[in-house]
Amino acid sequence: MSDSLESLRRKIDGAAELESVVRTMKALAASSITQYERAVQSLDDYYRTVELGLVACLHQTGAGIHPAGQVNIQGGGRGATGAVVFGSDQGLVGQFNEVLSDFVVHALRDMPGNKSILAVGERVQGQLSDAALPATGNFQVPNSITAITSLVGRILIEIEAQRERGEVVQVYLFHNRPKSGALYEPVMQRLLPLDAAWRRGLAELPWPTGNLPEVMASGEPTLQALIREYLFISLFRACAESLASENASRLAAMQRAEKNIDELLEDLNQTFHRLRQSAIDEELFDVIAGFEALTLPR
């Protein structure tokens, strides 16, 4: 009986320590969600400003876009399709990477040419490799808002290098976007090329005032700068939304784990108290039996 009680006590102590770790991870995930959601919200206004700047430049410079320099936005032919996939490096995120990889596989299945995958996160990289989409470039998931900037810079350099070599013609972004509560959904955005379809989409944006926009300086350098900002913000926002979704998924997983641990602790404590009471009852019976044996007449 004492061995059983000691074993149960060790299990209870272990479950309590595990619950403490889960609560810490839950608190970290909740705080991380807040900072990434704030980053996404702060980007929305800036993203809107850049879009309006592009509308103004396109109205002034005309429909043709032929920028020079590092940003090559045109593309043609039937080259490979590039994809930037934002996943996770760590586990305890439920079906976060599985849902995203399935979405990527189905989205790229009917696209022409070969596929060139830039994977952010070891977990999603493994999922894509299992689906016969091995990554041609691998990046670690940033662990803070400030680390996103350097990651986006490296991704843009790699994309531009692949386009200059003619390895990719069009590039898509794939990531999970947070929804209400701890939910998320996989989404896709075409990043390049910035072609006639992209210009038509910008042309449909309403100008917020009744005054027609005008670019004061030379239109071409301004357009180049806005395009670079557009590409940078698109990648930055995708990464921030992915990190917010990852932490939301981890928070939900930790909440489920905490609930399961609480139920386990309740069962263990009930069993412990029952066995302890049984041990006490046995000792009392032994005392009573001994007393009766001593007091019986001989």
Image (cartoon, grey):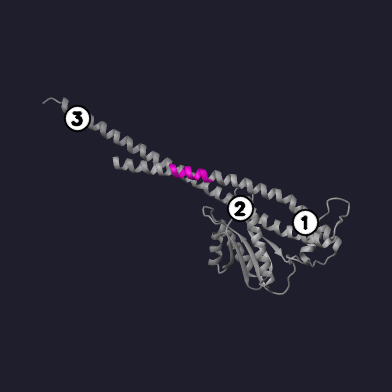
62 relative position to 87: left or right: right
Contact? badges 1 and 2 (CB < 8 Å) = no
Q: What element carries label 2?
A: helix
When asked about the image quadrant of residue 131, the answer is bottom right
Crowding at dot 3, Cα within 10 Å, few <14 / some 14-19 / many 20+, comes out as few
- Residue 111 appears in the picture as rendered: no
Question: Looking at the rendering, in which quadrant would you find the C terminus?
Answer: top left
When asked about the image quadrant of residue 160, the answer is bottom right
Q: Where is residue 22 in the image (x, y as percent from the top left)?
A: 49, 45
Q: Position of residue 283 (x, y in %)?
A: 26, 33
Where is 20 relative to 85, above or below? Answer: above
Identified at 37% across, 43% down, the residue is: 10
Residue type (three-letter) at the residue carrying disc 2: Leu
Where is 298 relative to 136, above or below? Answer: above
Crowding at dot 2, Cα within 10 Å, few <14 / some 14-19 / many 20+, comes out as many
Q: Name the residue under label 3.
A: 290
Q: Position of residue 222 (x, y in %)?
A: 80, 59
Residue type (three-letter) at the residue carrying disc 1: Glu
Comes first in the chain, label 2 or label 3: 2
Q: What element carries label 1?
A: helix
Question: Looking at the rendering, in which quadrant would you find the N terminus?
Answer: top left
Where is 276 relative to 127, above or below? Answer: above
When asked about the image quadrant of residue 270, the answer is top left
Q: Mark 2 points at which residue?
A: 243
Identified at 42% across, 44% down, the residue is: 15
The one of 125 and 7 positioned closer to us in this rendering: 125
Q: Where is residue 212 in the image (x, y as percent from the top left)?
A: 88, 54
